[in-house]
Every structure is written in C-alpha cells, then in structure tokens.
Amino acid sequence: MSLTVFPPPSAIAGWPRPNLVNPERHGLGLLILCFTLGPLSVLLPFGRLWTRFIIQRNAGIDDYLLAIGLIPLGALLVIISLSMHPAP
Amino acid sequence: MWDNPVSLYVPERRLAFAAEMSYLLATCLIKSSILLFYQRIPSRTISPTFLFITKVSLASVVLATVAFLIALFRACRSLFSFWFTNDQTTQMRGAGFGCSDEFNILLSAFIVTTVQDFIVTTLPLLLFWKVEMSSQEKKLLGAVFAVGYLVCLLSIARLYYIYLLFYVTFDTTWTSWYIWIWKVFEITMGAMCASAPTLPALYRHYWGALSCDRPPPVPPKPPHMIGVRRSVFQFHGSPSSSFAQLTYPHRVRYSVHVYAEEGRDDRPLV
C-alpha cells in the first residue's frame, strides 16, 4: 500500500550523514515512463470510448467504468510526475 | 531517505497517500471494465462457467478494492498521524501512530491483485483458443496477451522490492521509486490492453480495411441466380452461337459465368 516503514533505531543509527547539497538521486526513468506511457494510456482508451460512444453507439457499463477509471489514472500520472520534482 | 531534508517528509507521505488512492481506484475501475467487457461477448461463444468465473472475479476485484481502501485510510490511528509516519523528530518524541502491520497488508494486497491479474489475462485466452483466425490476427492477439502476462510477472518483481524495503534497507523514498515504476507500467498497460479490442473498429471506420481483414464472405450462389444470369445472356443471343461472339466480342465474358442449372454439371455451357 503506502509503505509506512518504521526503521528500528539500530538501522537509523547506521544511516550515513545527510548529504543535502548533492544527494544521490534516481534518474529520470520514472518521469520518462510517465511521459511516454502516460499519454498512450489515455489516448488509446479515448479511442475506444470514441468508437463506442460516437461511431458504434453501443456503449455499455464497461465503457462508463473505463471513462471514470481514466480520471484516477490521470491523477496518478500527475501526482507521480509532480513528486519527481527537483530537490529544493 | 537519509539525504532528504526533514521538510520533505510530510509532503512525501501526502503524495504517497494520494498516489496510492488513485492507483487503487484506477486499477479497480479498469479491471472491472475488462471483466464486464467479457460479459458483453455474444452468449453463444461463451460458456456458463466462463460467465460465472467473470462474475466471481468482478466481485473479488470490487471487494478487494474496498478492503484496501479501508486499510489505507485506517493504516494509522488517523490520517493526521499517517502524514508524520516518516518524520523522525516526531518518532523520536515517542509519539505512537497506532499503525497496523503494513507488511502483512502489502503482502495480502500483492497476492490478491496478482491472482486477479492472472485470471483477467487468462479468461480471454481460454475463449480465443477455439476461434479460428488468420495468422496475423493470431500474432496481434498474442502480442496483447504477452503484454498482459508481462505485467503479471512484473508485479512479482515488485515483491522483491517490498521485501527489500521492509527487512533490509528501510529506505522508503528510495525503494518506492522502483515499486512505482512497476505500478505505472502495470496500470498504463492495463488501460491500453483494455482498449485494444475496439481499436480495429476505429481504424476501419476512418482509414479503411486492415491488412489482416479477410474479404467479406461470399454468399453461396442460390440456383435462381443462375437463371438470372442466363436470362441476361439470352437477351443477347444463344451462348453457343458464334454469331454472338463475332458481333458482341465484349459480351463473350458473360459466357464464362453461365453454368448448368442446379450444379449437376459444373462445366461452362460454352
């Protein structure tokens, strides 16, 4: 879930001194993933919904669920992209 | 984790909470959408067992999501204390957070979602096993299933990082990066696979037939059609008459289509 970890005091004692000037950081991997797969994963379902609602006019409950599901999906991508912002 | 300024601890928790919640909602909605899509397949192609499994998995997806949402909101005594779970100054003050054992929740969530992913991927495979299709259609469909199983396998890779986090490094911010990579990959692939079956129809509507489309089936020629063709020809003269061939050379091609009636003799009449 949300990864609440309580490190034991012995582990915290073993941590190195904070390097706030030039900290070790992950690369842009997650951000690139969000910016490549993200638009695709919104466009393709949009194409499906367009087909079902506009062209075939046979939208069912599965299409409505997918349409609603796109909202948290977009929110997730935005949250993750935002949380990758450069350190202050 | 240790390189993060203390001022980032609380925002990090809030972001993690929001991301987790949207992830749970999105996976639930996309999985249910896929399962309900299976139910819309014309009933003559699917068995009652298939429908039953679909309904059971749908119920399990919904129930599991509700359970995990409750677990997320009740992970600690209150949401307020959840924000401060990474804050060492609060931890050192000896504040209790009343948090439940997160590793057990994570492990159960992991097992349940992986089993659901496998079911959702395997159900259509059982269905399409019997259907005859061209090799190109098979390749396309195989690609979609390959992505589905890849996602299932990647979610197993996630377990390794969860273990690493809880028992080896305790480094939340660093290790959850890897976990979120798998999660983003899984959910975007899920959304794409969910819309894949409809996209050929979209393509055909705007850009014409696909290269893997078969030509529309030719209906078997009913006997009276032969009579019609024959009468068309007879209008111009007897098929065997050389006079017709000489006079109307461009109409000679008609003779090729004229067959004996009722299919008793398949040789052309001329």
Image (tube, helix red, strand yellow):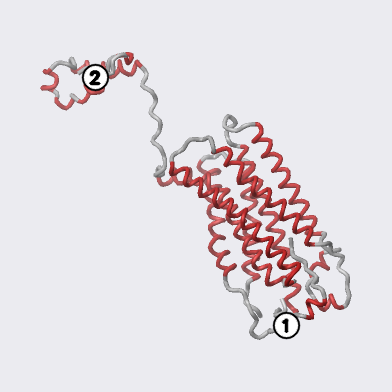
Query: What residue did someone put label 2 on?
Result: B268
Mark in the foreground, 1 or 2: 1
**Could you tell me residue A4's position as x and y percent?**
77, 66
Asked if B9 appears above or below B219 in the picture, the reply is below
Q: Chain under label 2?
A: B
Quadrant, the N terminus of chain A: bottom right
- Identify the chain of the residue marked 1, using the numbered disc in the image: A
**Residue occupying image coordinates x 64% and y 79%:** A24
Quarter of the rendering containing residue B248: top left
**B109 versus B202 height, above or below:** below
- State the image coordinates of residue A33 (x, y, percent, origin top left): 56, 64
Classify mark 2: helix, strand or loop. loop
Q: Residue at x 71, y 47 (%)?
A: B61
- Residue B69 spot, x, y in % from top left: 76, 55
Q: Could you tell me how far apart the alpha carbons at marks 1 and 2 are, in whole angstroms? A: 93 Å
Q: Secondary structure at mark 1?
A: loop
Determine which of the numbered discs, if any, sits on residue B240 in the image.
none
For the C terminus of chain A, the quadrant is bottom right
Task: Pick whichever, A78 or B42, lies toward us.
Answer: B42
Q: Are marks 1 and 2 in contact (CB under 8 Å)?
A: no
Q: Circle 2: is it few (<14), some (14-19), or many (20+) Cα within 10 Å?
A: few
Kind of residue at badge 1: Pro
Residue tagged 1: A16
Picture quadrant where residue B218 is located: top left
